[in-house]
Image (tube, rainbow, N blue to C red):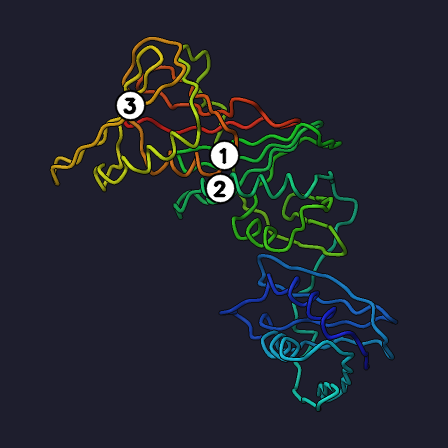
Amino acid sequence: MNFSVSSSAFLKQLQLASGALSSNPVMSILEDFLLELKGKILTITTSNLEVSIQTSIEVEGKGNGKIAISGKTLLETLKSLPEQFVHFEINDETRGVEITSSSGKYKMVGENPADFPEMTKPDGDDNFTIESKNLLVAIDRTIFATSNDEMRQAMKGICMNINFNNVTFVATDAHKLVKSTFLDVVSETATSIILTKKTLLTLKGILRPESNVKVYFNKSKAYFEFDNVMLTTRLIEGKFPDYNAVIPINNPNKLRISRQDLLSSIRRLAIFANKSTNQIVFDLQENSLTINAQDLDMNNEATEQMICNYDGDPVDISLNAKYLIEILSVMTSEEIIFEINTTNKPVIILPAEQEPNEDLLMLVVSNY
């Protein structure tokens, strides 16, 4: 088979697919792009066994066929070429590959395409559509809250709870929790699936904010289709914790405060907190917040007082500065609300004004 294609257009599609190339593969062919020509359509596939990406481009082609080509070699060759049409000549018997550009010829040997893992496609699977900008927001909000505990595989991923008229993304490491719901999503099926952190990081790298993403899912896999790209991923097996059970209700004490001012204050105070506990203490009085940090081992201590809107009983609550910084850094609202029950229950953190068709809840466990 042979084909000619714009070097820059081909490179763009290769870079999209490169998100699933393996750097230390269990099989050498996982370092390759699988190229398949059918008529004028060249399909590009990569896989690391957990995530697979497939995209395609229109070319001037002759003869149908497949070849697996070294990802690193192909990417570096095309990156080094100025924009031009390049011609690929592939010998199906010897798997020899010859690339011709305006300045020369480059030869390599491909691998047997039959050794490449088969990429499945959705076939009657349940699905819904979500705006990619919302999916990107969900990824940014949840990635930091996943667990690294090998004994809790489900918590290493992000739970996508699909309902008939909304979808909720949840992540927790038992110290902090994020629950991000989008209310303008319609599905004919209600279920929960658990996506790997690698899947969402890969998606983040190739999604464009202006796209719509069609999400297919079954018991073992999820598929994300957008802009002529299909990303396939294995799901994490197991049951995600009942996150609603740990969210306290009827919280009588409410603090409303500037997010950025509070974040800046906590960053300063964290310098003086104990490095193993990262503990800071909120002392809440009427319209007044005093934050204390102390490290007895180093004789370090710091206190800051902030004006706020507080409605509730006087309360002292110990929180982890590192977790608070992570949570406040991914929120975007100008003001936030802390809902506090008692000193030994988790604290809820909400945007003062929810975005349209969204419902965001953050939670941090107190260091009582």
Q: Residue at x 55, y 38 (%)?
A: 159
Q: Which residue is mark 1?
A: 331
In this rendered view, identify the residue nearer to me: 110 or 339.
Answer: 339
Q: x%, y% of residue 45? A: 69, 65
- Mark 1 crowdedness (10 Å alpha carbons): few <14, some 14-19, many ≥20: many
Above or below residue 265? Residue 124 is: below
Residue 319 figure quarter = top left
Q: Position of residue 260 (x, y in %)?
A: 43, 32
Where residue 164 sits: x, y (%)? 71, 28
| Mark 3: amino acid | Gln
Q: Amino acid at mark 2?
A: Ala
Where, by quadrant of the figure, is residue 160 drawn?
A: top right
Q: Earlier in the sequence, mark 3 or mark 1?
A: 3
Measure how far apart labels 3 and 2 are at the Cα level: 40 Å
Which is closer to the viewer, label 3 or label 1?
Answer: 3
Residue 13, relative to residue 352: is it above or below? below
Q: Position of residue 363 (x, y in %)?
A: 43, 28
Between 304 and 247, the one lying in front of the other is 304
Query: Split into 4 quadrants, where in the image is the C terminus?
Result: top left
> In the image, what residue type sits under mark 1?
Met
Q: Give the residue displayed 57% in from the left and 51% down from the top.
A: 199
Residue drawn at x 32%, y 26% as measured from the top left: 366
Q: Which element type, helix, strand or loop, lies under badge 1?
A: loop
Are discs 2 and 1 less than 8 Å apart at CB?
no
Q: Foreground residue, 237 or 75? A: 75
Q: Which labelled disc corresponds to residue 305?
A: 3
Label 3 sits on a secondary structure element that is strand
Residue carrying label 2: 154
